[in-house]
Image (spheres, rainbow, N blue to C red):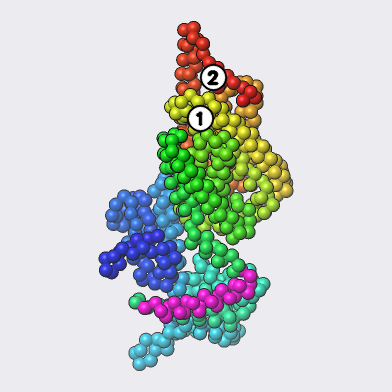
Amino acid sequence: SMKIKGKSGKTITLSPTEWMMDSIFRPKLAVDLPTFGIDNSEILSNAGIKIRGKRDRYSYSDIEEGREKIIELALSYEKIADNKRDPVQKQTITLAYNIRNYEAILGYMSFARSGVTLAGTGTEGKPDRRADISDIMLTAPVIKRKLAEDQQAGLPMNPQMQNLLQQVVDLANFSKFGLFMVPPSEKSQTTWNTAGNLIWAVMQQEAGDPMTAVADIKVIEIVVRSVEPDDDKAFRKELSVLHDRFVKRAEERGQYKRIGLEAHYYRADWFFWTMVCFVVGMVCALVMWATGRSTAGRIFTWLTGLLTTTGGVLCTIAIVERCLIMRRPPVGNLYDTIIFICAVVVALCLITELMTKRRFALGLAPIAGTLLIILSRRYELGEGKDHMDPLVAVLDSKFWLATHVITIALGYCGGLAAAVLSSAYVLMRGLGLDNGEKDMRRSLTRAVYGMICLTLFLSLVGTVLGGIWANYSWGRFWGWDPKENGALMIVLWTLAILHARLGGYIKEWGLHLASLFTACVVVFSWWHVNFLGVGLHNYGFTAGKSSIWGFYCVVLAMMIFGVVVMFIERQRKLASSGNGRTQPQTSDEVSLESR
């Protein structure tokens, strides 16, 4: 949303839809809206634009004076390799693209606002007459026949005709890209049309149904010209006519079935309410831990469970709606993996809580859910694009999306859930929050061991399925692709943990420290490979590499903390043994099989 000051000085909030409608139908007003978010004012100062602060929002009118310079700089920066561009250069290129895209939106309806000028029709000092482009489209057969006759006769093109056609070409080009808003009337055509495509097809005599195309353009012209500054009744009426016309055609083509569901998905804003539930649940979880087993603690235990479950259900509803809208399994791009992993990790934590009833997994569930849902929202805003876009060709297989991709994503979930539980173990034992309660430590250890087993199984199956898919698609089972290597690393690392545990090389502390490092291996396979600049089937290259290294540092710091605590505990144990006191058997010395 966008907040602006109205004529009366009152703050007005514009929704994205309202902003888009103003940009398309009222461009003179829209150019003064604070459309462009500038995170570094150096971008504008380099173009000679007056700045207001380090970070601010600017309108198109504010940056118009430096538009040419911004585009010039962007073109020069594009010659630099992507990995060698500094942040200012990258943001300048992004701003240049945004400016051009916004100009395309502002000019989309130019054909309907201005029409064309009929050169030479003015008499007695009066200006030349203007004509609707829809009327010019009706004369396309005559124009084409006249041009052909002149060409056969060897005559030059009439200047007035040349001027007219140049105007038509310019107006068609303005509205040729962006909004594919017109459903085709021909059943054989699958792609929807822009207004410019219709104009061009009719003028070239290539339209399958030219009269319907002309009528479509006429309806759009009427809508655009019904816009009045202080009265929207006529506009709403004509817009309804256009809406009904296009909806009826889309329904006849069977392409309107999921439009209502998609509109409901965006209106419901499921992930926002999911985040609210998780954040409030996280606060309740902290209070739950702080109040222990008291009456207040039981109340907050109930609230934490209710809010976390509600958040998980809302997240799942959103994922199901996305599947129904896109008609494919839930994971098809990097954004999908975040929300899917969020729902599954929360579910795994809740299942662990049902099995252990120790309240540690219950408290961790909303914390993990909060972090992941915030990551999804940041990624969505940072990418600034529709994440329900069509799949890239290599991923366009419902069977393999439902088997290989889902299995690999579930493997990520298991590894991350194990790391979350191990982080709780390290912090509770290191800070003495568990009060030396060995039963709780054993419960955590069992849960982590189970998660590691689950991760190994899912990752191994997913990797084999991926190899079969690769052999089917590219003719080779294994190609040492970064994504393939990441999956193999998860398999080998979890296998090493289980062998070390069963062989007695690591006990409780070792298992949890190794489980923590599993998070790094999973994140490398899930996210980091997208920064390497190579790979056949990455979900997409993105910005924010520093966040990945920050995550690695946090995990490493927690591991170091755990090693220090483990060393201190052993030193205390040795000191106690040296003083002749009998030391009770610690949970580290109890084998997993005896629990």
Name the residue at the front extreme. 295
Mark 2 — residue?
586
The type of residue carrying mark 2 is Thr
Residue 233: say if magenta: yes
Residue 425 tag number: 1
Q: Is residue 16 above or below residue 122?
A: above
Q: Tell me what residue is drawn at x 44 percent, y 74 percent.
A: 110
Name the residue at the left extreme. 9
The answer to whether residue 68 is visible is no
Name the residue at the bottom extreme. 124
The answer to whether residue 346 is visible is yes
Q: Is residue 122 left or right of residue 7?
A: right
Q: Which residues are magenta?
A: 231-255
Q: Is residue 371 above or below residue 19?
A: above
Give the number of callouts: 2
Q: Position of residue 461 (x, y in %)?
A: 69, 40
Quadrant of the rendering where the N terminus is positioned? bottom left
State if disc 1 and disc 2 touch (CB < 8 Å).
Answer: no
Q: Tell me what residue is drawn at x 69 percent, y 52 percent.
A: 399
- Quarter of the view holding residue 258: bottom right
Label 2 vs label 1, nearer the camera: 2
